[in-house]
Image (cartoon, helix red, strand yellow):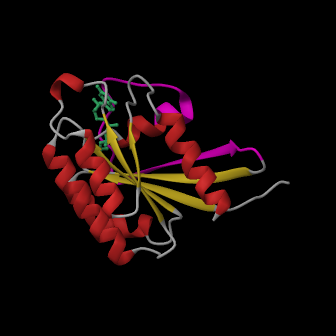
Amino acid sequence: IRVYKPNWWVLLGDMGTGKTSLVLRFVKGQFSEYQESTIGAAFFTQVLSLNEATVKFDIWDTAGQERYHSLAPMYYRGAAAAIIVYDITSTDSFVRAKKWVREVQRQANPNLIMFLVANKADLEDQRKVGNEEGEEYAKENSMSFFETSAKTAQNVNELFYEIGKRLARA
Ligand code: GTP
């Protein structure tokens, strides 16, 4: 069976949490220590082959800098999935992630699937946000939770394949 679903996903989160790095790790298998901050938003497209379906999707990687906040609704309204990213070494980024969750819950398409992603899991020695804190918050908000590292590739494919599978079922 070949299923073609036009859909797009959006990444949201504070600046520097690793949104672009996660997408580049997934789409190109690359990582850069000197990834530049996104201006406005960046667009990627990808095809995933799952067991019974081929899912083609677009990813909007939004800019985390506050001055671009007003652009975000253009990308999350109508999105099939939102990936909200924080950095385990920054409590501020976790606070910001929770604000994104509330905003998206209020404003986006009610069928949208939300994922909470705790990135930079390789920086365990600088961790400020406990794994349980993220997991707990995700559970309360019916989100799937992943701890990832764009640097080491930990859980990155798992995250994107899980989104694809969830949407293929939806
Ligand atoms: P904005 O575009 O400003 O919103 O940032 P962003 O969320 O897209 O973050 P970006 O991917 O630009 O990464 C910011 C910095 O964190 C870069 O220096 C990356 O190399 C670094 N980085 C991203 N992911 C990881 C990770 O998993 N581990 C480590 N150690 N560094 C990471």
Compared with 138, 93 (above or below) is: above
Q: Is residue 43 left or right of residue 11?
A: right
Compared with 82, 133 (above or below) is: above
Compared with 162, 97 (above or below) is: below
Which quarter of the rendered picture does the C terminus lie within?
Answer: bottom right
Q: Is residue 99 left or right of residue 10?
A: left
**Pick the front one: 18 or 156:** 156
Residue 59: percent from left, percent from top = 51, 51
* Residue drawn at point x = 55 percent, y = 30 percent: 28
Q: Which segment did they paint magenta? A: 24-51
Q: Is residue 8 left or right of residue 40?
A: right
* Residue drawn at point x = 17 percent, y = 54 percent: 95
Tell me if residue 62 is in the magenta stretch: no
Residue 132: percent from left, percent from top = 26, 44
Residue 60: percent from left, percent from top = 47, 54
Ligand 1 found in image quarter: top left
Q: Image quarter for residue 16?
A: top left
Residue 37: percent from left, percent from top = 29, 40
Q: Image quarter for residue 67?
A: bottom left
* Residue drawn at point x = 27 percent, y = 59 percent: 68
